[in-house]
Amino acid sequence: MSPAARPHAPPSQASILLVEDEVVLRSLLAETLRAAGFTIVEAANADEAWAYLHAAGGGVDLLFSDVAMPGSMDGIGLMTRVRKAFPDIKILITSGNLGPVDLNAFDGFVQKPFTLSHAANVAAGLLGMEPPEPE
């Protein structure tokens, strides 16, 4: 079955690589996404995320990454690498100030500040799933 024809995994099996350098935000968002049924892998920056993806051969359904973060690359650099190496991974970017970036370059965008439920709904939508139940 081709990757495009592959059915989306149910939420309990869908995995998200969450890349956010703000520890509190990353923890809260990871908790919300786990409660929605996703498997979450957390990374504090793009370098950690790329190392995980490289070692796992992709291994996630969705990359959810902040744009601005410390390290040798930002979220846009990570997205560019992921698009080339793992084209089947959906990409959701978040930023408070995206700047002049082509929004068509990734699958979704969540403007900061955002509510945790909104972010979970966007992630679920990108993976072709029903949004999580409101709390």
Image (tube, rainbow, N blue to C red):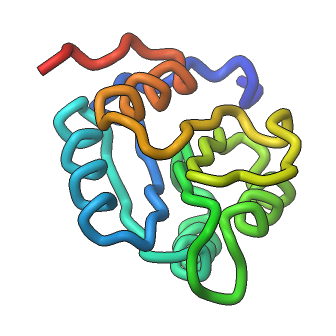
Q: Give the quarter of the image for residue 68.
A: bottom right
Relative side of 123 to 29, left or right: right
**Residue 124 place in picture, x, y as percent:** 44, 24
Asked if residue 46 is positioned above or below residue 120 in the image, the reply reads below
Asked if residue 41 is positioned above or below residue 92 in the image, the reply reads below
Q: Looking at the image, which is closer to me, 35 or 95?
A: 95
Q: Looking at the image, which is closer to me, 56 or 26?
A: 26
Q: Looking at the image, which is closer to me, 126 or 72?
A: 72
**Residue 25 place in picture, x, y as percent:** 31, 58
Quadrant location, the N terminus: top right
Q: Give the quarter of the image for residue 2.
A: top right
Q: Give the quarter of the image for residue 75.
A: bottom right
Asked if residue 97 is positioned above or below residue 22 in the image, the reply reads above
Number of numbered markers: 0
Relative side of 103 to 33, left or right: right
Asked if residue 116 is positioned above or below residue 54 in the image, the reply reads above
Quadrant location, the C terminus: top left
Which residue is situated farthest in the bottom direction here?
A: 72
| Residue found 37% across the figure and 31% down from its top | 120
| Residue found 47% across the figure and 31% down from its top | 123
**Residue 83 place in picture, x, y as percent:** 80, 52
**Residue 35 place in picture, x, y as percent:** 17, 36
| Residue found 48% across the figure and 26% down from its top | 122
| Residue found 84% across the figure and 33% down from its top | 104
Relative side of 11 to 18, left or right: left
